Each structure stands twice: as C-alpha cells, then as structure tokens.
Amino acid sequence: MQQIISRSIKKHKEALRLIEAKYKIINKIAKLIINSLENNGKIIFMGNGGSASDAQHLAAELVGRFKKNRKPLAAISLSANIATLTAVGNDFGFEEIFSRQIESLAKKDDVVVGISTSGNSRNVINAITQAKRLKLKTVGFLGNNGGALGRLVDVALTVPICDTPRIQEMHIMAGHIICEIVEEHFV
C-alpha cells in the first residue's frame, strides 16, 4: 500500500513539474476566455468519462464562483445533459454527441474547450472540427503527445505523459488556475 502511495505521489510531482513549464499556455487560455466573456461569448467545455466530470466542474466554477463572489460567467458543459447525449447518441451515433450541440448552441465569440487525455476522442474531434467551421476559438486540455486534437485546436495544453490519472490531475489544476485568473479579472 505504501508503495502505491509513494509511486502515485512521485508521478504527480513529475507531472506537476511538466505542467509548471506550460505557464505561457495557461495564461494564453485565460486571456482567450476573458476576451470571449468580455464580448458576451460563453465557454463551452466537453469531455468523456473523467474528462466529462472535469468539463462540468470547470463550467460550474465559472457560472458559480471559484473563490470570490462575483457575477456569473457564461459557461456550459456539453457532457451534462443526459437527455441530449442519449438522444443524439441513439439517433446519430456517439461520435456526434458534442458536434450537434456545438452546431446548435455555439455562437460568435464562444471558446470551445475539448478535454481528452488521449487527444483522440472521436466525438471531441468532431466537435472541435465543427467549432472550427464556425470560426470559433478552440482549446484542448490533452495528454501524451496531444493526439489528433493537439494538431486541430488553436491552443493545446498538453501534459506530455501517458498516465491518465496524472494527466487528469494536471488538467483540473490548470483549469483551476485559469478560473482564478478569469475570476480576478471580473471581480
């Protein structure tokens, strides 16, 4: 048991060192989000599995609050509406669950954030492709080498390791930092 704990903490520290070097990318994402919100845009998050939970978590931090009471900021997670997910999945296929929502909900000045530890989630790729067609700014929270999404998004925050739990830990940490920067701007 101690071995698992020690190994996990060691890997977390290694991932932390890698993400710390990405401060310019984190700042760039925060600026994209601030610009979107200042222009009445919204932030659209999506992901699968644990990344779906991260998408919901980060949207909630913006709509509710991160640390300070302030006006709500426009954000949504495409992973949250089970009726839409199952209807689109049933009628069009799982690969279209996010792209259909982008097509129906996204508008000028929105920022679309795809979260994928592999960077190869087909439904996230399809949604980002749809967002690009609509000329929206796109961000990827990715792992390993960024996969196909790393080459598709405008800004890629890639945790360059193959350990999914550590990637997810860095995604939520970076997301929290971004939320704090955004919140400070609007307080």
Image (cartoon, helix red, strand yellow):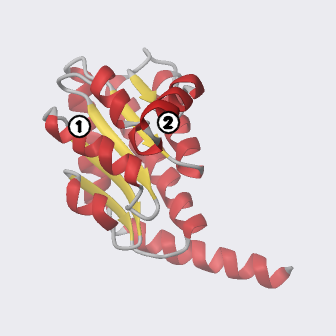
| Percent of width and height locating residue 168 | 54, 59
Amino acid marked by disc 1: Ala
Q: Is residue 61 visible?
A: no
Residue visible at 37% across and 28% down in the picture: 101
Residue appearing at x 33%, y 67% in the figure? 147
Q: Are marks 2 and 1 in contact (CB under 8 Å)?
A: no
- Considering every residue shown, the one lying at the far right of the view is 1
Q: Which numbered circle lies on residue 89?
A: 2
3D distance between C-alphas at marks 2 and 1 = 19 Å
Front of the two marks 2 and 1: 2
| Residue at (48, 22) in percent of width and height | 63
Crowding at dot 2, Cα within 10 Å, few <14 / some 14-19 / many 20+, comes out as some
- Nearer the observer, 139 or 9: 139
Which residue is the site of mark 1?
A: 131
In front of the other: 167 or 132:
132
Question: Is there any visible trace of residue 106 in the rendered image?
Answer: yes
Residue in the image at 59% along x and 49% along y: 49
Q: Report which quarter residue 143 is drawn in.
A: bottom left
Residue 8: x and y, percent? Answer: 68, 75
